[in-house]
Amino acid sequence: MNILYDHAPEQFLACVPLFIDQVKKITYIDLFLSSLRYASSFALFWRKNLTRNREEDVTQTMYKETKVLQPLHNSLPITNGTNAVPTEVTFGKKSKVNRVCDAFLEVLKTKTATNLQNIITANVCKSPPALEDGLEVVAKLMKEDSQMADKAVEHICFLADVNRLYDNALGLYDLDLALLVAQQSQKDPREYLPFMQNLQEMTELRRRFSIDDYLNRHAKALTHLHALDVFAEVQTYTQKHALYQAALSLYRYNPTQHAALTLLYASYLETKSSFKEAALAYESLHNYEKATSCYLASGPSSWRETLFCALSQTPPLSGPALTDLATSLYDALLESKDYFAAGTIQLDYLSSIHNACRAFCKGYFFSEALHLIAQKQEPTLLEEVIDPGLSDAFASSTELLAECKAQLLAQVPRIRELRAKARADPLAFYEGERGGGDGDLPDDVSVAASSRLSTNRSLFTRYTGKGSQGQSIGTAGTGVSRATSKNRRREERKRARGKKGSVYEEEYLVASVGRLIDRVESVRGEVGRLVTGLVRRAMWERARAVEVALAEVVGMCKACVPEVFGTPEQPAELVADENGYRPIGGDAVLQESIDAAGKRKEPPVIAAFEKLSLLGN
């Protein structure tokens, strides 16, 4: 049945009127429509591990080997006196099944008397089923022809789940239609009749609210409460179903109600640990006490907002309470290494110039510290705080740069050595971990492979042990399918560690060098501020030493980038062989590592380094 459409879709859709006239039998048309839907679903079921495409062309999938006559592209469709379905009606961003069903509905809309069953089937067979459209056909017939309505509801209940139809009928707010569907089901009248009678006695808006609440359409039910103008009930319902955003949208132009809902939402956000948003909500309501506590709980990055709300309370926070708050923020900012903010709090709220300068020095903000000393006329702090701060920063920076230099001197030659080994003997290199480091190759690996693809195929046999035991690679791959997940997790842990001598060492070292370069780039600003501070305090030798160390490390980084992150010849991609083998589990992780090592990372960009001219060459 799918082939009737997939063979020539445009031609088929143009000839839908002719198809209906020639098939004639209603049951055969129903069979065609339902077969499209269920055949596509079956195709998805058996191909779920191979494709994500739900709308398959069966001439290219299930029946690919079937010889089908070529469509008559040059012949005009025969319409037999009827109008062909317009192309724009049937072609668009819709599924295959829906395109066909819409094309049939376009033709059948004038043939309700003869093809009512087909109209119902075309709606129900859509993906997802258009149950409400089918029920609306039944509802229209209930007003025009009760006998045809009975036949229609019987057919739609045969095609679809009656419980879903009952819910959809209720969702149309048509009690007569819902009752007609319920009578076709196995429901006990004692279950639905009292409910239906209760709905019948309600006003229109209250009935719609009750139906939407029953169907768990809570956001829609809330709109009916809004229309009923029962704000107390709106608040209760909003809290019960967490409909705060919908409620705020409904009352955005009613300031009093909007403020009440905002307060409820702020309390809800606080219980969900969304302290930043809760604080914003409280602050918008001028509830500064609650806003202060929420901003404080959201973290030290909100220190400005916290102090603003604390000083905006009635009465404003002052005395020991304000000191305690500022101290807690200062400690949190030091822990998060936001030294500039910590120094600002010490200066503005704790009135400690000494501690403010110490915080600025920890963050390498020596210019700010020197300016503060001059502004407050505290020259004694130059030797008490600034000079020790410069010494500590100098020691930390030189130690860091020395570690970076040592890492580059160790890792770059090792990367060079590993790549030389891989080029000289790829098979021995990728099998070295299992060989125990003595250079012996395992017996189950063929040494005849010379190309990169052959090498990759051979190295995967170390996970299966069946490469040359009279069993194909494809069979070996499937023989360990139960251990795939475990093998993959184990290999991913090995890859993350990058153990020396393992097949993952080169990839790990390249990533490590990349992280080092990023670190060096990130500290260049700090070291630059340190050099300026040292010169301002006439510590020439230290300034020259740390600048030379930074220049040396930056030069080494720039020199190693082409070698470490260059793009060599791309390795051959491992694809399924004639036996259908694809790497899985640990094999797949290893293949990813090989590809990553071959393609390399995007080379990092290193800015030019400019020395301070006062320090000389």
Image: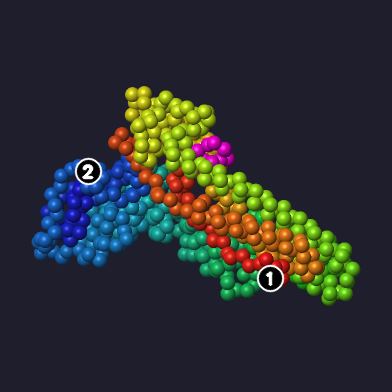
Residue 370: x and y, percent?
80, 71
Of the 4 image quadrants, the one containing the C terminus is bottom right
In the displayed structure, does residue 126 sit left or right of residue 219? Answer: left
Find the distance from the CA under tag 1 to the CA under tag 2. 77 Å
Q: What residue is shown at x 71% (from left), y 60% (from top)?
A: 546
Q: Residues within 10 Å of mark 1 (few under 14, many from 20)?
A: few
N-terminal of the pair, mark 1 or mark 2, is: 2
Q: Which mark is residue 17?
A: none
Give me the disc on residue 63: 2
Query: Is 198 displayed left or right of 27 in the figure?
Result: right
Taking the image as drawn, is residue 159 in sight? Answer: yes
Q: Which residue is mark 1?
A: 613
Picture quadrant of residue 482: top left
* Residue 375 to residue 36: above or below: below
**Relative horizontal placement of residue 6, taking residue 191 as reference (left or right):** left
Q: Residue at x 58, y 72 (%)?
A: 252
The quadrant holding residue 309 is: bottom right
| Front in this rendered view, residue 529 or 56 | 529
Q: Are marks 1 and 2 in contact (CB under 8 Å)?
A: no
Residues drawn in magenta: 497-506
Q: For this rendering, which residue is in front, 79 or 24?
A: 79
Query: Few, some or many C-alpha atoms within 10 Å of disc 2 (few <14, some 14-19, many ≥20)?
Result: few
